[in-house]
Image: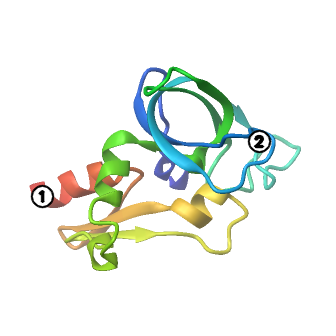
Amino acid sequence: SITRRKPTLEVGEEVYAAWWPDVNERGTASWFAGRVKSYHEVKSKDDDDDGGEDNDYGPTRLYTIKYDDDGTEMDDILEHYVFPKADYLLSTEGHRDPSRKKWKGVRNVVDENSSDEWARLVGWYVVAIDGREVSYSRLSDALKAYDAS
């Protein structure tokens, strides 16, 4: 199912998350290491009122993050601003060299037409294994799967 393509970060998990100096005016973010303190889910704009989901990607998660550097917390950070620590480090290594954004055997897929910001901006990772494409929500899992294939 497509919903499984969205990573679900759990309480206590190490992450990198956006941080803004003014929580009311979220412009350009800085990124810091932290841990998930809590989360809650909200229906996406595409969910219909009869309980069925029109959005293939599922509900949107908002996270509360406790940052490692100074212990501050920020609430209601949208899921596309919170990354598993391993994925953040893998995706930013060599960030000054755009050619490093490619990973052998793994490609990043986004849904440019989705109203779901995670699907449109972050997306998921696809690996060809034994002639079929397998989707992973985490870059680190996709790389491990490719290495093991």
Callout 2 environment at 10 Å: few (<14), some (14 to 19), or many (20+)? some
Locate residue 124: give its quadrant.
bottom left
Locate residue 56: give its quadrant.
bottom right
Q: Quadrant of the C terminus?
A: bottom left
For the residue labelled by badge 1, is the local secondary structure a helix, a strand or a loop?
Answer: helix
**Is 48 displayed left or right of 144 in the figure?**
right
In front of the other: 105 or 12:
12
Task: Name the residue located 67 percent from the left edge and 40 percent from the top edge.
Answer: 21
Numbered-mark total: 2
**Is 94 displayed left or right of 123 in the figure?**
left
The residue where tag 1 is placed is 147
Using the numbered discs, state the Cα–Cα distance from disc 2 to disc 1 in whole angstroms. 36 Å
Specify which label sits upstream in the sequence, 2 or 1: 2
In front of the other: 44 or 78:
78
- Residue 16 sits above or below residue 37 on the image: below
Residue 119 appears in view: yes
**Is 100 displayed left or right of 43 in the figure?**
left
**Is 52 displayed left or right of 69 in the figure?**
right
Callout 1 environment at 10 Å: few (<14), some (14 to 19), or many (20+)? few
Q: Residue 90's spot in the image, x, y percent?
A: 29, 55
Callout 2–callout 1 Cβ contact below 8 Å: no
The residue where tag 2 is placed is 43
Q: Residue furthest bottom?
A: 99
In front of the other: 12 or 145:
12
Residue 39 appears in view: no
Task: Name the residue located 49 percent from the left edge and 37 percent from the top edge.
Answer: 8
Task: Name the residue located 64 percent from the left edge and 56 percent from the top edge.
Answer: 28
Q: Residue 147's spot in the image, x, y percent?
A: 12, 58
- Residue 132 sits above or below residue 149 on the image: below
In front of the other: 47 or 50:
47
Q: Residue 134's spot in the image, x, y percent?
A: 33, 61
